[in-house]
Image (cartoon, helix red, strand yellow):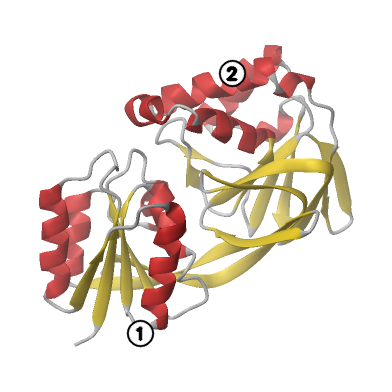
Amino acid sequence: MSSATLIANPAASQFTGGMHRAAIRALAKHYDVTAAWPRSPEESESMAAEAVAGGTEIVVAMGGDGVVHHVAQGLVNTSAVLGIVPVGTTNVLARILGAPARPKKAVKILGKGFGAKRVPTLALVGRSYQAEFKRSALFSMGVGADAAVVHAAEQDPLRKRSFGSVHYARAALTTIRKDLRKRPPTVKITAGDRTLNGIGLLAQFHNVYSYFGRKPLILGRPDPIAVLIIEELKLRRALGIYRGFAQSGDLGSVEGLTLWEDVDAFHVSSPSPVEVQADGELLAAVTELSVTFQPESLTVAVSA
């Protein structure tokens, strides 16, 4: 019998023991199932990688977008399938890819049979002085100002869990007021013959759902990547930027923001380390970062 590994985060907002047992029963109809309980994001990644190395056919992430992000790191550019039982607050990736957005339905397709969908990722290679890291982004990534907002929101995980988009909006406004409006544009972004300096960027390669609600946030045409460069952030413009996010409007026309479309790779450099986030997960502070589009690099279980 083929094998499956279920990696679960019991701290996820919608997690229940009953749902976990139901997922085990559903997978057990077709697979020899191993249940894993990681104690850290790093352990989620290592458990997924070990499962794939051992021949596991499907690794199921039961949690929010954070758990999905970390589990997927061991599956990118392999033949293993990523299953998602979404029990987090927003469950962005499941909504983007057409995987079931409700845990009961996700468990049901694991038991009845699922389709496999090949999807793209972004390859991130970052450097800071002598250290280097490699990472895959599943639906978006950001540098500098964007990562700073994620950092601020992560400082209060209880409010993040309880208030979702309201908490992110509050964190964004507070970060602009206390930090971002004072930052000089020292982050250099280069894509082909285009170069621009700013305080950060947000890159997307799907029409994604924003953490500011479930309405898709569309940055122009992410074909393959759309890069929104934040040249400066003034508090008086925060309302206009928020409206652009909420209405999926033309953010490239907002003063202080520039939108690049039709990007397949870009490079970021900074004289001092700047933070990087991928899929809402803080990664590291870097002085150099290369980002490359990887087509059909991850297989995800979706409704058949």
The numbered dot on residue 55 is 1
- Calculate the distance from the C-alpha at mark 2 to the C-alpha at mark 1: 47 Å
The amino acid at mark 1 is Gly
Seen at 57% across and 34% down, the residue is 151
Question: Which residue is at 55% across, 63% downward?
Answer: 121
User: In the displayed structure, would residue 186 be above or below residue 300?
Assistant: above
- In depth, the one of 217 and 275 nearer the eye is 275
Towards the viewer: 16 or 245: 16
Image location (x, y in percent) of residue 294: 61, 68
Q: Is residue 250 visible?
A: no
Characterize the local packing of mark 2: few (<14), some (14-19) or many (20 or more) Cα atoms within 10 angstroms. some
Classify 10 Å Cα crowding around label 1: few (below 14), some (14-19), many (20 and above): few
Q: Identify which residue, 240 or 7, lies in the foreground.
A: 7
In the picture, the disc for residue 214 is: none
- At 64% from the left and 60% from the top, the residue drawn is 224
Counting residues from the N terminus, which is met first, the one under dot 2 or under dot 1?
A: 1
Q: Nearer the observer, disc 2 or disc 1?
A: 1
Front-lying residue, 17 or 250? 17
Q: Is residue 233 in view?
A: yes
Q: Amino acid at mark 2?
A: Leu
Q: Quarter holding the C terminus? A: bottom left
Q: With respect to residue 220, does 34 lie above or below?
A: below
From the image, tell me which residue sits under label 2. Answer: 173
